[in-house]
Amino acid sequence: MANSAHPRIVVGVDGSPASEQALRWAIDYAGLTGGTVHALAAWDYPAFYGWAGLSAPPPEGLHPEELAGQALSETVRRVAGDDAGVPISEAVVPGNAAKALLDAAKGAALVVVGSRGLGGFTGALLGSVSRHLTEHAPCPVVVVREG
């Protein structure tokens, strides 16, 4: 059960402009409701090279988890600035983004994700984290469209 006194808002961050907009929306909502923001980035070896525009293996010596953590922290700093006005926690977890967000959504008041707008055949072929969340999350889901 979500703590309604300080609702926990989970937001998926993958470095994309859509996820930055989702984070901005989650921070604004948390400010209005007295909530906290839990920014989450998931990483997975097979899919990682397409994450946030990476088209090549990560630099020598850097683990994908470290890169995901750096990207998450940079995104939070870029969007929230020095003082977001609400508590923000960050987590980097291994595995599929949809599963990681579903696990984090347990007990949350809300999940917020960005959508890149891949519809039609491309969206069906690639799958959709936002669609999976709207069908399976244990709490309400907000999908913030890019643009």
Image (tube, grey):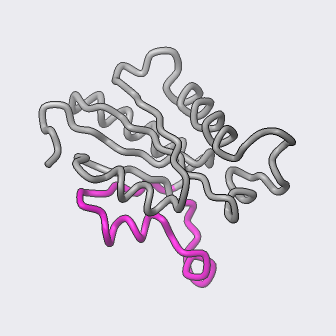
Q: Is residue 147 visible?
A: no
Residue at 67% from the left image edge and 63% from the top image edge: 47
Q: Is residue 100 left or right of residue 66?
A: left
Residue, far top: 82
Q: Is residue 8 magenta?
A: no
- Which quarter of the figure has residue 51? bottom right
Say above or below: 112 vs 130.
above
Q: Is residue 86 left or right of residue 125?
A: left
Q: Is residue 135 visible?
A: yes
Q: Nearer the viewer, residue 111 or 47?
A: 47
Coordinates of residue 131 in the picture (x, y in percent): 42, 70
Q: Nearer the viewer, residue 108 or 118?
A: 108
Q: How many marks?
A: 0
Residue at 17% from the left image edge and 45% from the top image edge: 2
Coordinates of residue 134 in the picture (x, y in percent): 34, 67
Residue at 69% from the left image edge and 40% from the top image edge: 67
Residue, far bottom: 121
Say above or below: 54 vs 76.
below
Q: Is residue 119 magenta?
A: yes
Coordinates of residue 93 in the picture (x, y in percent): 51, 48
Say above or below: 50 vs 110.
below
Coordinates of residue 48 in the picture (x, y in percent): 69, 57
Residue at 69% from the left image edge and 47% from the top image edge: 64
- Which quarter of the figure has residue 78? top right
Q: Is residue 51 left or right of residue 87?
A: right
The magenta-colored residue range is 116-145
Say above or below: 41 vs 47.
above
